[in-house]
Image (cartoon, rainbow, N blue to C red):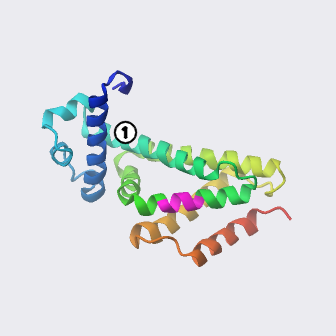
Amino acid sequence: MDVKNLTTKGLETREKLLCAAEKVFGSKGYYEASIVNITQEANVAHGTFYNYFPTKKDIFDELILKFNRELRLIIKEEMKGISSYEEAQRRGFQAFFRWVKDRPNLYNIVQQAVVVDDNLYRWYYAKLANGFLKSLSAGMEAGEFKRLDKETIAYCLMSIGQFLGMRWGYWEEKDVPEDVFEAAMSLIFEGLRKR
């Protein structure tokens, strides 16, 4: 559906459905969730759902696409105007950890994608990796980082973020402790920093 053709009320209803789907998929899981659960959570008529999304899978896909855009934008905004590539990466990690803690349903939904739609799951992480690749390339060109295989480093950085985010933000619903954050940053930047 082309959202450009929706009225203000239509956009609001679509957003209500997306917010409801985030809650329902986040708490029940994709396979246990139903369109009825989503429409009840959104407080809209069952048939209204189909005006915006043909299937449950379509709204799930839209959530993944939306989350990816939002997360990349949040990280980009956090890194904006930072002259040091190292400091920009640190800020990006902090933004990600806040996102995981503040939006646990989103994090859960992204993890479900591996069994719901492996191609979508791969796309999600490839888009994130692309952001790391750009930043790593710029850091290497500026002489701040060693010249290493960028894709390998990007996926290593995402793994560190993924599991620290899961450990603290998702499982514990807490901020990543400062000493944990600094240990991870030390591991990353002692390995990346050009001497």
View extreme (top): residue: 5
Name which residue lies at 41% across and 57% down.
107
Q: How many marks?
A: 1
Q: Secondary structure at mark 1?
A: helix
Residue 117 left/right relative to 17: right
Residue 46 shown in magenta: no
Name which residue lies at 62% across and 59% down.
91
Q: Position of residue 87 (x, y in %)?
A: 70, 60
Q: Inspect the image, locate mark 1, and give the three-letter code of the amino acid beneath it.
A: Glu
Q: Which residue is mark 1?
A: 62
View extreme (bottom): residue: 179
**Secondary structure mostly taken by the magenta-highlighted segment of the chain:** helix
Give the extent of the magenta segment: 93-98
Residue 160 or residue 40, whichever sits in front:
40
Assign the C terminus to one quadrant of the image.
bottom right
Crowding around mark 1 (Cα neighbors within 10 Å: few <14, some 14 to 19, many 20+) is few
Residue 99 or residue 106, whichever sits in front:
99
Where residue 44 sits, quadrant-wise, is top left
Where residue 144 sits, quadrant-wise, is bottom right
Name which residue lies at 22% across and 28% down.
51
Q: Position of residue 100 (x, y in %)?
A: 45, 60
Residue 111 left/right relative to 127: left
Assign the N terminus to one quadrant of the image.
top left
Residue 69 or residue 28, whichever sits in front:
69
View extreme (right): residue: 195
Q: Position of residue 156 (x, y in %)?
A: 62, 60
Q: Position of residue 188 (x, y in %)?
A: 68, 66
